[in-house]
Each structure stands twice: as C-alpha cells, then as structure tokens.
Image (cartoon, coloured by chain):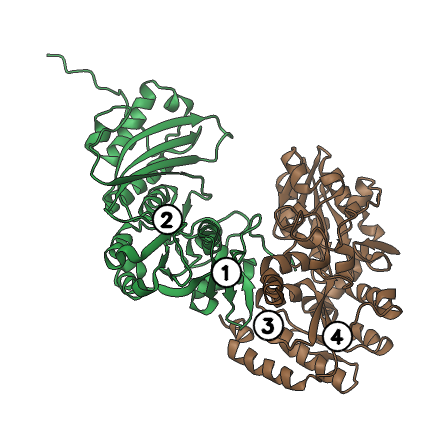
Amino acid sequence: MKFVDEYRDGELAKKLASRIAASVRPDREYAFMEFCGGHTHAISRYGVEDLLPANVRMVHGPGCPVCVLPVGRIDTAIRLARNPSVTLCTYGDLMRVPGSNGTSLMKAKAEGADIRMVYSTLDALRIAEAEPAREVVFFAIGFETTTPPTAVAIKLAEKKGLNNFTVFCNHVLTPSAIQNILESPDVRDLGTVQIDGFVGPAHVSTVIGTEPYAFFAEEFQKPVVIAGFEPLDVLQAVAMLIDQVNEDRHEVENEYTRAVTAEGNAVAKAEVAEVFELRRSFEWRGLGEVPYSALKLKAKYAAFDAEARFDLQYIPADDNPACECGAILRGVKEPAECKLFGTVCTPETPMGSCMVSSEGACAAHWTYGRFRAASRVKRAS
Amino acid sequence: MNRPEKPFRRKLDIKNGRVDLSHGAGGRAMAQLVADLFVAAFDNDMLSAGNDQAAFDVSEGRMVMTTDGYVVSPLFFPGGDIGSLSVHGTINDVAMAGARPLYLSASFIIEEGFALSDLSRIVGSMAAAARDARVKIVTGDTKVVERGKADGVFISTTGVGVVPEGLNLSADAARPGDKVLLSGTIGDHGIAVMSKRENLTFDTEILSDSAALHGLVAAMVAAGGPGLRLMRDPTRGGLAATLNEVAASSGVGFKLEEAAIPVRPQVHAACEFLGLDPLYVANEGKLVAVVAPDHAEAVLTAMRAHPLGLDAAPIGEVVADDNRFVQLTTAFGGGRIVDWLSGDQLPRIC
C-alpha cells in the first residue's frame, strides 16, 4: 500500500540497522524514551528491538491516553453511566479499564447502564440528535491529537442547538507530562532511570508542532527527535538520537517532516483555544497530580460540560497496590518486573490500565514480546 | 364435482408480507411458511416427505458431525448473506476432517416483523449454496420470537459427512518440522462485513470469501494422503486464533513469515485505517493445513490447481516449543508473537 509499505521496508530496515550498529560506542549504554503509545506499539508489533544493538534500550513512556487515566476518573464515568437518564459514549479501549473494586464500564454495561462504543466524537453527536430524550455524554480522552475533534463536536452541538449533549473532558497535554518525567527524582536526582533522549510524539506534533519541545532540549539537555509511527520512522529516530548523543548535542530534530511543521496546525490549535482552557492540576496515573497538564471546557461552553451539568465531584481512588502501572508509566520499571504481569494480569483480565490498551507497555510486551523473556531463560539455563 | 379444498386459501405474500407470531405457532400459517418457502426452495425428497426427521443410510467408514450458529450483522454483505454463510460455514467444518459433506439441517429463529422478502432471499441463497455444493438440506425447524428478542434472523445448521478410509486429521497431530500451507488471502470476509456495519460504512470492492471448501479438501487429500496432519478454516479470531488452538492441542509452536502470508491490498488498507491486524480478521472460504514436510510440495501443487486455492502459499512451519508460542518474523525483519485475540479487535484511538 502506497505511503505505508515504504515505511515498513525490510531491506531499508536492514541497512539502517547496520548503520546504527556501526555508530554506537561499545563503551556506553543508550536509553531512549519513546513517549507515545503509538511508538511502543510499533516497536513491539514490528519487532524493532531485534534490529537494535544490545546496548541501545528503549524505555516506554506514558503517552497512552487510556493508561494515564486515573482510577478516580474511570469511577466517575461509571457513576455517570449508572444515571438512568445518561447514555455514555466511549471509545472501545476504555471499556475494560479497571475502576475501583473490580468495576469497569464493561461490567456496568452488563448490569444495565446505557454505554455505547463509538468510533468518533461525531458518532456521539449523532446519537444525541437521534435520541433527544437521552442525556448523551461523550467520555473524551486523549492528548492534543484528539482534542480538536472534541472542540469541533462541541461547537457543532452549539450550532445545532442540542441541549442533551455534553462532554466529560479528560484531555491531557504532552509537554507537561514530559516535563514532569524529566523533573522526577528518578531521572533527575536518583539516576535510577537513564534517559538519554526522547523519540518525540508523531500525531500530537502534527497539531502542536516542534516548537514546544525546544524548552526540554535546552533546559534538561536532552535531544528530542520527533518521529512518525511507522517502524522505519522509529529506527531512523533512534539513529538520529545516537548521533546527537555521540556528538554531545541536544536539539529538537524532526524525522516526521512529511506531517509535522515547526508551528503545527494553526486551525486545530485555534479551535482548541476557543473551547478549552487549562486546568490548574490534573491527576495522571503513574505521575500523580501534574500542574497545568489538562484541559477543561471554558465557562462559555459550560452547557456542554458534563462535570458542570451533573455536578461531578472528583474522588481520587487508589490503584491495586501490587500493580506497577505507575512505575512502568514513568519508565522506572519494565512490565516483567511487576508481580501481576502475566500471572493474574493479562489482556483478558487486566488489573492495570497498561494491560488494557494495545498501546500500553504491558499489553504490547505481553502480546508481542514475551517470547524474548522465555528465550532468555532458556539460554541462561 | 367439488374440487378438493386448497391447503392454503391465500398465497404467502412474499413481496410485502412480514413474519408474525403465527408463523411459528404450529398452525396452518406455519405449515404454509414451511411448505411454500423452505420446502419449495430446498427441494429434496427427504424434506418433502414432511417427517420430523430425515432418514438416510449410513455409509461405510467414519461419519463426522458438526453444528454452528449464524448471527452475522448485517444479514446481507458484499459477496454473501447469512443464508449462504450458514451453508458454507457448516460444510467447511465437516470438510476440515477431510470428510465429504452429505446432509445439513437448518434451524431458523426469526424475529416478529421480519420481511418475508428478505427471508425468501436468504432461503434462496441457502438453497443455491447447498445445490452448488451438492449437499442436501434435509430437515429443519422454525421458531418466531417477539420483536426485539432477536436481530432479524438467526440460523443454526448441523452437518454430517463421511471421512475416507485411513484418514485421521486432528488438531493434536502437528509435529515439529511440518509445513503450514494457507489456501489464499486472509481477512476478506471480516472486512467485507465490517464495511457495511452501522457507523463504519466505507466503500470497498472487497467481497466476502464465503465458499464451500470440500472440493479443495478432496484434492488435497488425494495429493497428500497420510502426510496431511490437520486442516482448519480460520473463521472468528482469524489465522491467529486457529494456529494458537493447534499449538495448544498439539503441544508445539509455530514460526511464520509475515511476508509469505497473502493479504489483498484493499484488505491491508482497510485494516490500516480501522486499526486491525489481518491475522485476526475472519475468513469464510480459506483453510490452513499442516502437512508433513515430504508431502508439502504435492499438497501445495494440488491446492494451486484448484480454483479456491490459486493463491495458496507456504507460510511457515511447526517448531518444538513448550510455551506453544505462534511466532512471526515481521516483514520489517523483527520477531514477535501472534497471540490469542483478547476481547474484540478495536480501532486504536490515537
């Protein structure tokens, strides 16, 4: 398929892999964090690890919208769905994310809650139009990529005069999360997590552009290479990061020039700025409360804000104490280091959010990569 | 002289009529539906005899029997409908034992209000599929449930067939070193059905691959004989689910080559934007066979000589593996597992 197969070409991959092998210094380790779940998925799905030298390690980041949603927000959505007048519209990935006490949207649906899986914000809008007697709430999640469509839906609802459509807004911001990781004691003081650079977001950057990353590169002296979600993109980005590390540079470079510009998508940014404003603070699974890291609806769109309409109070809730999703999302631990991984926690019965979405580090490792651990054990014995 | 009373005063209004509860109540309306629609379409002596069962002689050798329920949505999709599917699917389950399918039963659960024209179309399509496959639908049942208690129509079919002497295909028969042969492109059926799903409609030229595979199977049995270990048709859960089932039953692993697995460019494209993996998408006219290495070439040649096996390809081999992993070398050059499907395949959201 044109515009896709070119970025998955095995022959090009081989050439790039030998270039990388020739460029790494044997006397040091390289660790790069891929921020996005889309990269995590591509790395696992195409077996990119097998093309990297042994001293180059990828650290999975928190850029999976399903994974970073805290338990308290899932609980709120479940409470909302149990309101008999509410029809909750959600993306399929959220259905199996565990809330408190073993609940999930999937279980709430089985118990009778009106929860519908949709593919886009506009599907939810259509349901609101078709069923004026129902309070239709769209469970909005995601980074900067999915925020503009939510803004568009809200403005459309206003234009159509819909008074039964609201949004439960959980949109979060990438730069604040990266900053939080770089400022965390694990990275900054303790040195327990080595991060030599970032594979920067693909789709997010098509919206926000490359400029927002300049601060990290400068302030924390870490190179950032923005890369597409195809496996050759990732491999190319790793090659560029290794060059920067070897040359002691820390710049923002753009591998994904076919889609990302310095300024990003001005129209999308304007739509978002019109409808949303910053929250003072937002809880992330794994990162805890992160200041100015999420969006809420502006007061002038309060009529479309589910938190205002249903007077939703946020009640924080704890993860399963044995679940290491938090540490995994910060790059402190690997999936296999969690006691629950592959024992009681599998994609069929996820205990933590990282095992739910195909972009989650645990799900990706379990689904695509667990044969590596098995073959390591075999070699060792 | 008085003419004998007609069995039914009015003809069944197939053009504008709808199924109502009386069509399942055991009275004259039901008798008329059965006679004018089902018996007329399926048209064979055993069914016309009007008994509650079909009687037939048992042949020499081993018989196989299978049953399957069909609840596909939408009922009509590019390349087929629930009717043809309910014939092909059950014939294929019989055929995967290496058997020659003989007879089918068909049970209908119909929702009140279902258009007789649609029912007639579905039954006609079943009859055509059975006729083409030279298999008879010899007994059946009809139930009608209240509106809202079903989704149009659900069909269950049961099939029986006979296995040639000396053939013993079984999911536990795969051995390390065996070759894996696939009869053609994967994912066509799932993508064709999905292209007509509510909220998801997209234009594609992809047709369901729904087809009866027993002719292909017969050719493979003739070519492979005792070298054929097992055959499966990768339906729900796709090739991935099928090979994981075989790995579990046989206590082995698989090593596949992604580049060797045939996928149509249109299916590849649709999977790309839906966030699906063709390895997990359903097929209704494909089979995967595990064959002893010294028979693989002969079986592959026989497959490629059959109209339903033109794109047949060797896609990998069986390996010894206590973990029973289905492993894949990606076209990109890395390795990964092809795991069981968990939940439904859902599009990624960002």
Please identify the residue farthest to the top as the structure is shown.
B1
Position of residue A294 measured from the top left corner of the image (x, y, whole percent) = 81, 57
Q: For mark 4, does the 10 Å Cα neighbourhood hold few (<14), some (14 to 19), or many (20 or more) residues?
A: many
Q: Which chain is in brown here?
A: A
State the residue position of label 3: A50
Q: For mark 3, does the 10 Å Cα neighbourhood hold few (<14), some (14 to 19), or many (20 or more) residues?
A: some
Q: CA distance from mark 1 to mark 3?
A: 28 Å
State the residue position of label 4: A210
Mark nearest the camera among 3 and 2 is 2
Closer-to-camera residue (A338/B232) = A338
Relative placement, left or right, of A244 versus A1 is right
Identify the residue at horizontal 38%, vertical 20% (top origin): B25
Position of residue A193 measured from the top left corner of the image (x, y, whole percent) = 80, 68
Q: CA distance from mark 2 to mark 4?
A: 57 Å
Disc 2 or 1, which lies upstream in sequence? 2
Q: CA distance from mark 4 to mark 3?
A: 29 Å
- State yes or no: discs 2 and 1 in contact (Cβ < 8 Å): no
Indicate the chain on which mark 2 is placed.
B
Q: For mark 2, does the 10 Å Cα neighbourhood hold few (<14), some (14 to 19), or many (20 or more) residues?
A: some
Helix, strand or loop at mark 1? helix
On screen, residue A70 above or below B71: below
- The numbered dot on residue B270 is 1
Position of residue A151 measured from the top left corner of the image (x, y, whole percent) = 73, 56
Relative placement, left or right, of B229 versus A17 is left
State the residue position of label 2: B170
Q: CA distance from mark 2 to mark 1?
A: 34 Å
Indicate the chain on which mark 3 is placed.
A
On screen, residue B262 above or below A15: above
Indicate the chain on which mark 4 is placed.
A
Helix, strand or loop at mark 4? loop
Chain B color in figure: green
